[in-house]
Image (cartoon, rainbow, N blue to C red):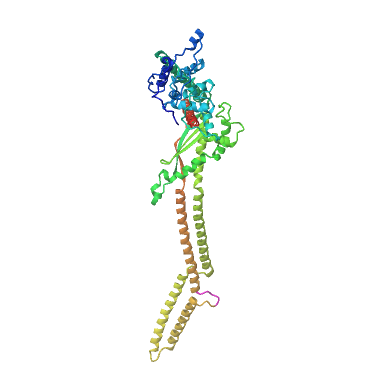
């Protein structure tokens, strides 16, 4: 940007010094723009009659004389580096019109508003967009207001941003820039005094208070519509419309039989809540399932109770409601919790009457006890069934072996093979002893020179008979001729049968011991449901908790409004940035 050189060395002599309002207005304009007042020049200017004086006297203004180039350079507009406007020296040979004086007064009033530099730059850009010939930033504000356009309105700024974003063939204007001022736009002669300044400050304060009251009223209206009214409706429902509900509370614990002799981790956790936590969680899941709801409805009529017309519409169940709707209501009215540290299952059942609530609680406890009994039933039955089958098989084998021994004894006529053998061997031993005596007697008789032949023959006969008896007994032990079974064979068969019977008997005893062990283990797997707190019907309604629920509704609606307002403020700031 180039500026014209200032011709301070040249003085222009006029017919009369310019003592009018031009220099005063220029000084006031410089002071308003934040510059020190310019020193008055000793440039004589012709006296200029005012419009009113000319009209009153009926005289015509004097024709202006021609200025040389040096005078024009001295009177050229000087650049103001602080506001971007140009201060124009008053020319004595031109007469301001009434419109130019009014424009200067309007600009002076705009200067007194205390607009920021950002607002002035925005006004200049809006004026350039609309093609208005503004000579300064304040003149741009004046022209925009005269055209009915608010340069500081949000919609105007959005239009300006959209216009800047379009691609045009013209080169964008480099800001800041100045527009030369026409000779007719001279500074106003009016100066704001203390009273006008105080009145302007008072008007600004009243406007700020008015805007603050309007914003407070809008805020209160939004709060009343989005927070207070919903909270009031919720409180009216809880205090007036809601049907009183009765809650029956009960507690029970699942226990198992004492496992004596348990070792390792099983013995460490036995007797604690951790040992039966899985069973407790299983019972909790069953009581909150659709199966329990359908069983409760079939036994004591869950759906029919909550379909009573005396219950308010929000808590009432439709007469033709589906199982899914009934199950949602069931989960809302049957609350079951499990404490893993203590192993206690806590249950709360809500109903419209205390008797019905207690009845539902007792029915659910019965279902839980049946479920606990069935948890380990299959495992116990499997253990007992295997041990029982083994014992029955061992017992049948033992009886078969005993029957075989009895058959052999009856068939062979021998009760005990070893005893029969011992008997035969005893007879043989006796005969051999007698035979030996007879042989000694015969040797004694033969030792005589002339023995008694009769006695010798008798002794020899006895010896022969003893030998035959011994031979027969020995044959009976080992020889099975003549259709008879030998004693050795009989003894062997009986011994095998008796050994088999003894083995089967031992196996049967072991199976019996395993059966007893399985019975003990099955008893250890048994679960018991013990009631800690029995269900007792309440005499006062438990729900609804009107004050707590109303306060909770207020907090919820306040949080929703706060989040929505913050989101809207952030989006508005992003759009207007």
Q: Position of residue 120 (x, y in %)?
A: 46, 25
Residue appearing at x 57%, y 27% in the figure? 313
Q: Position of residue 382 (x, y in %)?
A: 51, 52
Task: Tell me which corner region of the image, top left, top right, bottom left or bottom right, holds residue 255.
Answer: top left
Q: Is residue 343 left or right of residue 230?
A: left
* Residue 256 visible (yes or no): no
In the picture, the quarter occupied by the N terminus is top left
- Front-most of residues 75 and 427: 75
- Front-most of residues 470 and 9: 9
Q: Which residues are magenta?
A: 482-486
| Residue projecting furthest to the right | 320
- Front-most of residues 527 and 562: 562
Q: Position of residue 209 (x, y in %)?
A: 44, 18
Q: Position of residue 484 (x, y in %)?
A: 54, 75
Magenta run includes residue 418: no
| Residue projecting furthest to the top | 57
């Amino acid at each position: 940007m180039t500026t014209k050189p200032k011709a301070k060395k040249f003085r222009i002599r006029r017919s009369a010094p310019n003592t009018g309002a031009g220099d005063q207005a220029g000084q006031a304009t410089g002071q308003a723009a934040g510059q020190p007042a310019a020193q008055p020049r000793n440039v004589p200017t012709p006296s200029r009659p005012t419009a009113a004086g000319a009209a009153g006297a009926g005289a015509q203004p004097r024709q202006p004389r021609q200025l040389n180039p040096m005078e024009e350079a001295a009177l050229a507009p000087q650049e103001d580096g602080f506001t971007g406007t140009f201060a124009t020296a008053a020319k004595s040979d031109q007469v301001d019109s009434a419109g130019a004086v009014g424009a200067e007064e309007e600009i002076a009033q705009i200067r007194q508003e205390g607009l920021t530099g950002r607002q002035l730059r925005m006004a200049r850009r809006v004026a350039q967009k609309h093609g208005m010939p503004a000579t300064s930033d304040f003149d741009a504000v004046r022209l925009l207001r005269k055209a009915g356009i608010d340069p500081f309105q949000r919609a105007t700024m959005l239009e300006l941003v959209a216009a800047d974003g379009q691609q045009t063939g013209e080169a964008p204007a480099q800001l800041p820039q100045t527009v030369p001022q026409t000779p007719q736009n001279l500074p106003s002669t009016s100066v704001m005094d203390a009273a006008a300044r105080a009145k302007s400050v008072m008007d600004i304060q009243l406007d700020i208070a008015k805007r603050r009251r309007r914003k407070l009223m809008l805020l209160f209206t939004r709060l009343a519509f989005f927070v207070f009214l919903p909270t009031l409706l919720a409180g009216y429902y809880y205090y007036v419309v809601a049907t009183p509900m009765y809650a029956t509370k009960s507690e029970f614990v699942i226990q198992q039989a004492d496992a004596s002799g348990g070792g390792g981790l099983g013995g460490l956790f036995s007797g604690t809540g951790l040992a039966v936590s899985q069973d407790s969680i299983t019972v909790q899941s069953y009581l909150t399932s659709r199966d329990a709801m359908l069983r409760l409805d079939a036994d004591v009529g869950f759906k029919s109770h909550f379909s009573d017309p005396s219950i308010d519409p929000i808590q009432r169940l439709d007469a033709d409601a589906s199982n899914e709707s009934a199950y949602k209501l069931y989960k809302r009215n049957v609350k079951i919790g499990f404490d893993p540290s203590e192993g206690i299952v806590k249950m709360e059942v809500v109903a419209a009457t205390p008797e019905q609530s207690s009845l539902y609680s007792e029915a659910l406890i019965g279902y839980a006890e049946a479920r606990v009994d069935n948890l380990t039933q299959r495992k116990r039955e499997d253990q007992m069934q295997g041990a029982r089958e083994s014992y029955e098989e061992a017992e049948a084998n033992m009886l078969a072996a005993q029957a075989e021994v009895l058959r052999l004894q009856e068939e062979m006529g021998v009760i005990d093979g070893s005893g029969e053998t011992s008997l035969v061997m005893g007879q043989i031993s006796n005969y051999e002893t007698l035979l030996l005596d007879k042989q000694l007697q015969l040797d004694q008789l033969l030792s005589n020179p002339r023995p008694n032949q009769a006695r010798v023959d008798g002794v020899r006969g006895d010896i022969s008979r003893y030998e035959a008896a011994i031979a027969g007994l020995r044959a009976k032990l080992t020889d099975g001729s003549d259709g008879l079974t030998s004693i050795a064979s009989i003894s062997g068969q009986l011994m095998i049968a008796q050994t088999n019977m003894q083995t089967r008997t031992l196996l049967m005893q072991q199976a019996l011991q395993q059966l007893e062990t399985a019975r003990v283990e099955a008893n250890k797997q048994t679960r018991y449901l013990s009631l800690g707190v029995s269900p007792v019907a309440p005499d006062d309604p438990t729900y609804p908790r009107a004050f707590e629920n109303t306060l909770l509704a207020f907090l919820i609606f306040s949080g929703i409004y706060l989040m929505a307002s913050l989101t809207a403020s952030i989006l508005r700031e992003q759009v207007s940035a």
